[in-house]
Image: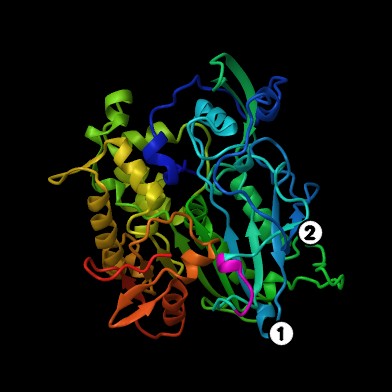
Amino acid sequence: MNKMILLASAFASCVPADGPDVVATAGAVLPAVPSISTVLAACGTAGSVPVLPVGTDLQRVDIDLTAFPDALCNDGTGAAFFFRPASTAAGQSRWVIDLQGGGGCHSPDDCARRWCSVGTNFGLDQMSSTLVPAGGTRGAGILVRGAAFTNPFDDANQVLVKYCTSDMYAGHSGKLVVNAADPVTGAPVQFQIEFEGQAVLDAVIATLRRDGASPPDYTPISGVPTPLPDLDDATEVLLAGASAGGGGVINNVDRVGDLLRANNTVCAGASCPRYTALIDSTFGPSNEGLNWGTSMMCTMGGACTWQDVLAAATGLYTSNGDASCETWHAAFAPATAYLCDDTDHVLRNHVTTPFMVRQGLRDQLLSSNAIASGVSVFGQGPMTLPLFSRLVRAQLIALGQLAITAEEGATIATTPAVFGPPCPDHDTLTSNLAVYNAEVLSGGALYAMFDVYANWTTAAAPTGVIYRPGDPTFCP
């Protein structure tokens, strides 16, 4: 077991817990305390980031809480996902499962501010299912379907997992009773909150596998119901996510792959189904190499090393991440086992599933958070946008050497694919323009993200396309 920092927002909010400790946890006798939704009803509001649009492309499914009682959002409402079945016979055994992103919270006060959208772009819509479109949503980005875009998963079974747990799909906390300050009035408040992201993901996967529950038939506008194929019959699965969704992929991808291989009905072995990961907008400069002594986490809270910062940011709930990281560190480097709390470290050292990273070199959220934090780079000074861009570019290139540099390099059989445009967009996987119109020049040709993915999965070249300073910029 370990605790996972919410790295997508770590630079902005990763300071020692700014409120009282947790009052009671699951397993104890909990006091009769209402949910965060009741206690902070007066200030609860949706965030400013785009919400899921109402649509008819992907149909909503409410997770069966009788079968999966822990599949709950932060406020205790039942979690949901969206799906549409394959559009061709060939696509029926192919799947793309996208984990929605949306930041996170790491202390009671931080979660209260998140619920009320105070000092953050996020809000209660990332903590509850109450604002989720009742019928369905539109498919876009990697879930788009139609001739206008060359999506390799156009005809596949498409699934979007709604994010409402603030924990990068790693939590399984049960109910917690916490003390915090009302983010508007400053008055002390006490509320219940839960972090069940891993339980939600597990319930979605089980439902798609028809293990304990089954998704309803898909009913399009035509009114002709169509069943969703069984995930256990898959020959190809892509698990994708951006920002906190990308962290969710890192936390769960190897474990979910083991489950899918163990239960596949059409083939056997380590290569069936063909199982890959796509991780977007969560690959900033390696935190281990930064100087946290200059950051506000140090000057304001005394967390002056990355180990201190991680410890300060992971005290609210216990959650599950990559198990092989813990096993490796326990055996070979127990003094640095704390690094398993860092999804950035896990991705660079312990994810053995073949994966592709898409990361904008000028990611506006990750770069601005890093700059605002006051963190610096040894020998190079405070973080700036040009420095952020140079570090990300160099470290994307370095992913090509993971078989040599990673702590589990001997088990990493596939060199990661990389797409590094110079663009500022963050959390791009649901954006048609960012997915299909952002291009990078390589060898005299222009490549978009899925061009690189197609090369990678068919043993063609190039599989690492990263912007070179001085080249033309092709950002949408």
Residue 164 x %, y %: 62, 44
The three-letter code of the residue at mark 2 reads Ala
Side (left or right) of 31 relative to 287:
right
Q: Nearer the viewer, residue 300 or 248?
A: 300
In percent of the image, x 38 and y 74: which residue is there?
Answer: 413
Q: Secondary structure at mark 1?
A: loop
Residue 253 x %, y %: 51, 61
Residue 143 belongs to magenta span: yes
Q: Nearer the viewer, residue 56 or 329?
A: 56
Sort mark 1 into few (<14), some (14-19) or many (20+) by Cα contacts within 10 Å. few
Per the model, the C-alpha gap separating discs 2 and 1 is 24 Å
Q: Which residues are magenta?
A: 141-147
In percent of the image, x 80 and y 71: which residue is there?
Answer: 227
Residue 476 x %, y %: 43, 65
Q: Earlier in the sequence, mark 2 or mark 1?
A: 1
Residue 132 x %, y %: 70, 48
Q: Nearer the viewer, residue 319 or 223?
A: 223
Q: Secondary structure at mark 2?
A: loop
The three-letter code of the residue at mark 1 reads Ala
Residue that carries the numbered disc 1 in the rendered image:
89
Instruction: Judge whether residue 29 can be spotted in this image.
Output: no
Residue that carries the numbered disc 2 in the rendered image:
213
